[in-house]
Image: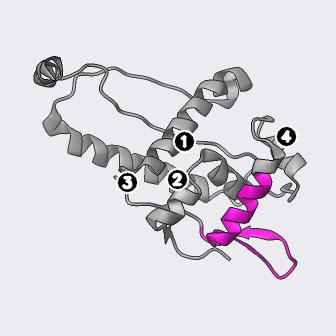
Amino acid sequence: GHGRDRVLEEYEFEAISSWVHTAILVMTNIKSFRESPVFIKQRLFDLVPEQEINKILETLQMVGLLKRDENGKLVQTAKTIKTRPDLQKLAARTFYEGLLSRAIKGFQLSEPHEREFGAYMVGISSKQLPELKKKVRTFMSELYEWALQNGDPEEVYALTFGAFPLTIHYQRNQQIGRA
């Protein structure tokens, strides 16, 4: 069975700071999953070398996110991996940079009916940011809970949302100019 949410320590998160770790972890929930680097590599669109997959399977067990059940089958120990939401460390950056570059590949590797991308560009004030973050986190966790209700997943999907400044604040720009 699945345990409670696991809040990972910083050092643990650093050990699994690539999207591939999480993808492989979630993949173990798919019925057709086979603990074979060749199988996993194929399912990941051949983007990850077998050697790396072997290392990741070891790390996930070491960090305690994967364990062997009574039949020796690899299973996920906790449904979710949580880190503090504003983890500003390099590990978080590595994770999102990797995942977003994978998102770009998503256009080449999947058909339109298999994906969903949307973008709005809006004007935002700094005082709106806390509320924006709250709304996004609420929506994302609702989406996540909805997805977890599916007892028979077939594929692993990444649900990402990004809000980032496209323009630089005028005052900040002045300071940069002077630096």
Q: Looking at the rendering, in which quadrant would you find the C terminus?
A: top left
Residue type beneath disc 1: Leu
Mark 2, other Cα within 10 Å: few <14 / some 14–19 / many ≥20? few
Q: Where is residue 29? Give x, y as percent.
A: 74, 60
Foreground label between 4 and 1: 4
Comes first in the chain, label 1 or label 3: 3
Task: Identify the residue at horizontal 65%, vertical 22% (top origin).
Answer: 107
Q: What element carries label 2?
A: helix
Asked which secondary structure carries label 3, the reply is loop
Which residue in the structure is indicated by mark 3? 87
Q: Residue furthest bottom?
A: 70
Q: Name the residue under label 1.
A: 159
Quarter of the image where one finds residue 47: top right
Q: State the residue in front, 54 or 66.
A: 54
Magenta stretch holds residue 77: yes
Residue segment shown in magenta? 53-78
CB atoms of marks 2 and 1 within 8 Å: yes
Q: Is residue 112 magenta?
A: no
- Mark 4 crowdedness (10 Å alpha carbons): few <14, some 14-19, many ≥20: some
Q: Mark 2 points at which residue?
A: 144
Residue occupying image coordinates x 66% and y 56%? 150
> Which residue: 85% across, 51% down?
37
Which mark sits nearer the N-terminus, 4 or 3?
Answer: 4
Write down the residue under mark 4: 42
- Give the CA distance from mark 4 to mark 1: 21 Å
